[in-house]
Image (cartoon, helix red, strand yellow):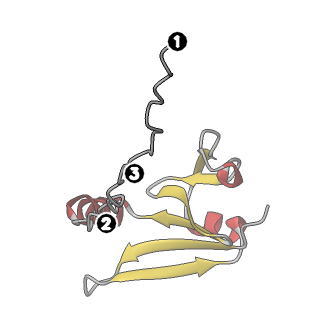
């Protein structure tokens, strides 16, 4: 397993988002009840990781970190993400193509026989 940090994201008493990091799934299992394992994630590195009661996850945060969120944090971050405006990028217009006139040879008159 290449994930070495297990992060729980929750709201503190003051309403701010807080992170708590664990160095193994076993440490996390001491605080939360494991109810299964992830067997359907599209991120193959998450398959086989524990699923805990009361937490949403596992999710990839970066190369070494697995993220779990409380339901309240998951809902609020998802709402923020869904209403965030993304800056639209415009495709560069291709330069106007110019059609060059093709020089055609003048018709040659054949001498009358």
Q: Is residue 80 left or right of 25 when viewed as pictured? A: left
Q: Which residue is mark 1?
A: 113
**Above or below, comparing residue 21 to residue 47 in the picture:** below
Give the percent coordinates (x, y) of residue 42. 60, 44
Q: Identify the residue at the far right of this view.
A: 1
**Residue drawn at the location 33% of the way across and 67% of the way down:** 73
Q: Secondary structure at mark 1?
A: loop
Quadrant of the frame with the N terminus:
bottom right
Q: Secondary structure at mark 3?
A: loop
Q: Nearer the viewer, mark 1 or mark 3?
A: 1
How packed mark 2 is, by other alpha carbons closer than 10 Å (few <14, some 14-19, many 20 or more), is: few
Q: Which residue is mark 2?
A: 77
Is disc 1 in contact with disc 3, using a CB cutoff of under 8 Å?
no
Q: Secondary structure at mark 2?
A: helix
**Measured Cα–Cα span from mark 2 to mark 3:** 56 Å
Sequence-first disc among 2 and 3: 2
Q: Identify the residue at the far front of this view.
A: 113
Question: Which of 90 and 65 lies nearest the eye of the viewer?
Answer: 90
Q: Which residue is mark 3?
A: 100
**Residue drawn at the location 50% of the way across and 21% of the way down:** 111
Question: Which of 78 and 69 lies nearest the eye of the viewer?
Answer: 78
Q: Identify the residue at the far bottom of this view.
A: 14
Q: Nearer the viewer, mark 2 or mark 3?
A: 3
Q: Quadrant of residue 75?
A: bottom left
How packed mark 3 is, by other alpha carbons closer than 10 Å (few <14, some 14-19, many 20 or more), is: few
Q: Quadrant of residue 90?
A: bottom left
């Amino acid at each position: 397993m290449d994930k070495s940090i297990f992060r729980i994201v929750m709201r503190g008493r003051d309403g701010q988002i807080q992170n708590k990091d664990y160095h193994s799934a076993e440490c996390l299992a001491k605080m939360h009840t494991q109810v299964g394992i992830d067997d359907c994630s599209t991120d193959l590195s998450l398959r086989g990781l524990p699923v805990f009661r009361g937490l949403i996850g596992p999710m990839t945060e970066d190369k070494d970190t697995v993220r779990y969120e409380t339901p309240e944090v998951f809902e609020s971050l998802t709402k923020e993400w869904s209403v965030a405006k993304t800056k639209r990028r415009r495709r560069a217009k291709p330069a106007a193509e110019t059609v060059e006139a093709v020089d055609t040879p003048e018709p040659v008159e054949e001498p009358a026989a």
